[in-house]
Image (cartoon, rainbow, N blue to C red):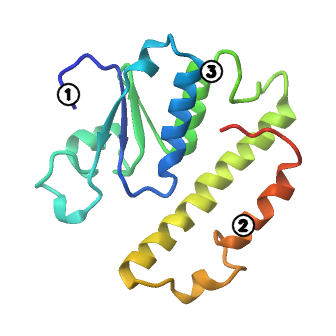
């Protein structure tokens, strides 16, 4: 991490299943709340996920300093004013609760409990379903220079079958996160 007085660090890698979600949400928060000093100056800390880098590269997910941030040694994670949050869904919800005071991006659980619950369902679906499957699909393509048989099937969980169901399931709701 740099020596400047940044209070908000985003720890991530180029290879993440949901790698764009967090950056897009942070930039959306920054646009909606341009005067927030944390959102103006957050720092991205890029990490290596390669086992070959253990003990060789400072910014490696199994480094002792990073395991203090995320004991699972996984990405992403954020550190905001000394408080660490890991797991994509937990980070998105924490950022929304912390910075989205006008409730532009996240429904209010008290005022709109059904919409809030539906929004949580989609956040967790993206976290546990689409993101990991897309990462596995990408890694499979890289390793084998082709998509393996399980990923060719439209019935495969996380493949085109999941995406085909999305528009019908949104039911006209605006799900921003």
Q: Position of residue 8 (x, y in %)?
A: 37, 24
Circle 3: element type: loop
Quick check: 149 above or below 143?
Answer: below
- Please name the residue shown 77% across and 67% down the image: 164
The Cα–Cα distance between marks 1 and 2, rounded to whole angstroms, is 40 Å
At horizontal 43% and vertical 13% (from top left) the residue drawn is 37
Which residue occupies the extreme bottom position in the image? Answer: 149
146 horizontally vs 143: left or right: right
Q: Position of residue 46 (x, y in %)?
A: 29, 44
Residue at x 22% of width, y 19% of height: 4
Left or right position of 73 against 52: right
> Which is nearer the N-term, disc 3 or disc 1?
1
Residue 2 disc label: 1
Q: Extreme left residue here?
A: 56
- Give whichever of discs 1 and 2 has the lower sequence position: 1
**SS label for mark 1:** loop
Residue 129 at x, y = what percent? 63, 61
Q: Which residue is mark 2?
A: 162
Residue indicated by mark 3: 100
Quarter of the image with the C terminus in it: top right
Determine whether 42 is above or below 66 in the image.
above
66 relative to 106 in the view: left or right:
left
Q: Residues within 10 Å of mark 2 (few under 14, many from 20)?
A: some
């Amino acid at each position: 991490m740099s020596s400047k007085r940044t209070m908000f660090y985003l720890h991530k890698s180029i290879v993440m299943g949901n790698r764009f979600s967090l950056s897009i949400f942070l930039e959306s928060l920054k646009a909606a709340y341009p005067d927030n000093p944390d959102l103006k100056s957050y720092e991205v800390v890029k990490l290596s996920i390669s086992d070959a880098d253990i003990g060789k590269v400072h910014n490696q997910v199994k480094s002792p300093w990073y395991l203090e941030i995320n004991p699972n040694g996984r990405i992403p994670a954020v550190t905001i004013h000394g408080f660490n949050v890991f797991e994509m869904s937990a980070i998105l919800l924490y950022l929304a609760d912390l910075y989205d005071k006008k409730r532009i991006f996240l429904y209010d659980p008290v005022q709109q409990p059904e919409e809030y619950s539906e929004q949580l369902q989609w956040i967790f679906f993206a976290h546990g379903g689409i993101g990991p499957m897309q990462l596995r699909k990408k890694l499979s393509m890289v390793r084998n220079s082709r998509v393996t048989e399980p990923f060719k099937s439209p019935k495969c969980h996380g493949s085109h079958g999941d995406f085909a169901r999305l528009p019908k399931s949104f039911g006209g709701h605006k799900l921003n996160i």
